[in-house]
Every structure is written in C-alpha cells, then in structure tokens.
Amino acid sequence: MTELVQHVVSGAWPDWGGDELGPRSVTIFRLPGEFRAVVAVDNVTLGPAIGGVRMRPEVTPGEVIRLARGMTLKCAAVGLPHGGAKAGIAAPPWLDVRTKEALIRTFAVRIADLTDYWPGPDMGTDETAMAWVHDEIGRSVGRPAAIGGIPLDTLGATGYGLAICAEALEKSGRLEIDGARIAVQGFGAVGRSVALQLHERGARVVAVSDIEGAVTNPDGLDIAKLIDFQHERPLNQFPGGAPMIRDELLGVPCDVLIPAAQPDVLNRATAAQVRASIVLEGANIPATIEAEQIFAARNVLVVPDIIANAGGVICAAAESRGLTAAQAFADIAERLRAAMTEWLARTESGQAPRNAARTMAQERLQAAAAYRRTF
C-alpha cells in the first residue's frame, strides 16, 4: 500500500487556522481498508499533549485541528501540565471487533514516533481501544483498570466535571440545582454521566436524546432506569416518558441545556430554538461563534467547553501521573472549582464567557512559554 504521510508545521495551511500557538504538527496517513487517519499535535508548551482518538466516517483534518486547539486551551485553562492534541480515524466505529482491533493497533504503530502525543478515548473509541494502543506503544490514557488505567468514560469523569461546574454556578447564585430542569443532547458516555450526576443532586432531567431519537418528561425522567433501558431498546421507547423528534430537544423549556453530542450542533439556526437560561457545553466545540453571540444577546449564560467538559482530560492527566481513580476525581473537583471561580469573576467583570476562558488559557501559556528555550 502506498503510504501518505505529511508532517505540516504551523502556518503551512493558514486556511486551517495556524497561528503562534500551533498546530505544532499534523500527520496524515493511510490505514488498512483504505481508511485514513490524522493526528494534530497543537501545542506542547505546558507539556506532552493529550487528546482523544475520534473514530467516525465524517471526521476531517480541519475538525481534528480545531479540536486539538480546544484541548490546548482546555489543559491550560484548568492548569494541567499538558498540551493539546487530537486524532481522527475516518472509519465507521461499528466495524466488527476483529477489524476494529486491527485498525486501532495499526493506528497505534503509525503514531509510535509521535512521542509528545498521548492518545485517549473519544467518539467511537473506548477503554478497550486504549488498551490496544497501550499494548502496541506503551502510552495511552483512559485505559481499563485491569492494566493500571482509569477508565474515564466508564467512571463518568467528564460528566462528573460538568456536575462540579453546575455546583459552582449554584454557589455563585446563577443556578439552583435542586428542581432545575435539565435537557441533555447526546446520551452517550458524557450525557449519561452528567444526567445521572445532576439527577442524584435533585435536578429534573426533562429530556434526553441520542442519535436515533429523544424522550421527554416535564416531571423528570428516572435516569437510572433509562440507562438500563437504553442497553436493550431504543431510548425513545422508554415508558417513563414521551417520545419526541431528536432535534426538538434543543427547544425544550429548561433551565440548563447540555449539548453532549457532536461539534457545531448549536449554530445560527438552532440557537434561536434554545429555551434554556444556561448552556453547559458537554461536547467539544458544540456551538459556533455565531450561536454564542446569539446567546449573549439573549442573556443566556454559556459555560464554554474548554472549562465545562475538562473533567475527562483532568482524569487522563491524573492517570498519566499514576494516580488512583479516587485521586483523579478529587483533582477534577479541585481544578474545576478553581477554574470556575476565576472564570465567573472574569465574566462578572465584563469579559464575554468564551473570551474569559480563552484569556485564562492564553495567560498560562504565555507564562509557561517564557521558560522555554528560544535559541
């Protein structure tokens, strides 16, 4: 098979958003079955880059580069000693197990020399995939506990972090969790976890959706029963709620909307449908700049992804340091409470929500860069 391998330095593809931060490198290569993969290492000023491996047919280099930048800012905003990266495999995640394992293992071998990149789970990959990667090259995060990892998706690290952010909003007087109406778009690893976390804190999860449909109950869904039900039957057939068209979830009356699905689901068109007072971004880049501007004009508070969903990467970073799951979750709580306190103070002083988060990250990157070799 003819290999296609490209290493692209920052600024070589300006239409992909190259700037002084990165990307440091972009690597594109072929995998068996004529599938392609891309790895974007955005910035390593703070340390080795961490980023998930996304596996879906629609993945593109541009999307991966945008997500890698988000990881750079996320790690910096919450004070992690890591940079940002992301990988994408343009293949269907529903391949049979044998084929998928061969594909992931080949991917791992191809990134062996990218030693400043630590891969983790993302859409279409899980702790088993990270075990395969680790078996090949000795580095990954989000691995099964049986091989010394912290299975962050199974344990719900990102969802736990979102709940900590909600608690910070409550402490600041922006939200009362007990009785709050929550709508969750995307009932996968992140969506299930945050729904359960907030349900256990007294919130009413009034609607959830997955790729096939949605279910709603104004009085609140029984999340534990819904999770069990989803393992056997389509979510929108859950008897504890009424089925609804998937994308109608965005317009459900609620206090908090948590987009935990794909990028850019909130855009100029869909933002107008939202009837929440708070958007807590559970997915990476779930809202376009135009959508966030619309929310600002309507006084809808948006907690940006680079803070809101940082629980997963905080857990991954803890795993890379050899910490236990309990220590990792304590670190999530400590870092996100501190980050939310700083972010809320900045927004209260007049900074736009995303600008406040980006400024937090950029100030830490600039401070760290002063200690890097310049000659």
Image (cartoon, grey):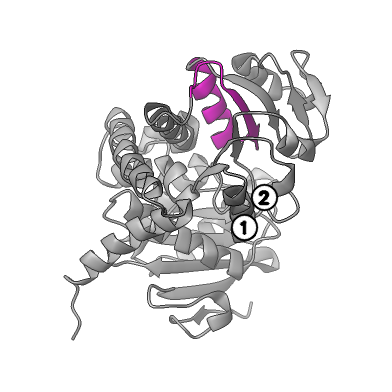
Q: Is residue 80 left or right of residue 177?
A: left
Element type where label 2 sits in the image:
loop
Q: Residue 181 appears at what percent x and percent y?
A: 61, 23
The mark found on residue 245 in the picture is none
Q: Are marks 2 and 1 in contact (CB under 8 Å)?
A: yes
Specify start and end residues of the magenta stretch as a single range: 176-200
Does 323 appear above or below 206?
below
Quarter of the rendering occupied by the C terminus: bottom left
Closest to the observer, 159 or 249: 249
Is 44 part of what is drawn in magenta?
Answer: no
Q: Which residue type does callout 1 highlight? A: Thr
Residue 308 shows in the view = yes
Does 179 appear above or below 71?
above
Q: Is residue 163 left or right of residue 3?
A: left
Q: Residue 120 appears at what percent x and percent y?
A: 45, 50
Quarter of the rendering occupied by the N terminus: bottom right
Q: Is residue 317 left or right of residue 265?
A: left
Residue that label 1 marks: 288
Q: Residue 159 appears at what percent x and percent y?
A: 49, 33
Is 188 part of what is drawn in magenta?
Answer: yes
Element type where label 1 sits in the image:
loop
Q: Which residue type does callout 2 highlight? A: Leu
Spatial distance from mark 2 to mark 1, Cα to Cα?
6 Å
Closest to the observer, 208 or 3: 208
Residue that label 2 marks: 266
- Picture residue at 73% right of the left edge, 18% below the top: 217
- Picture residue at 49% right of the left edge, 21% below the top: 177
- Picture residue at 74% right of the left edge, 42% below the top: 273
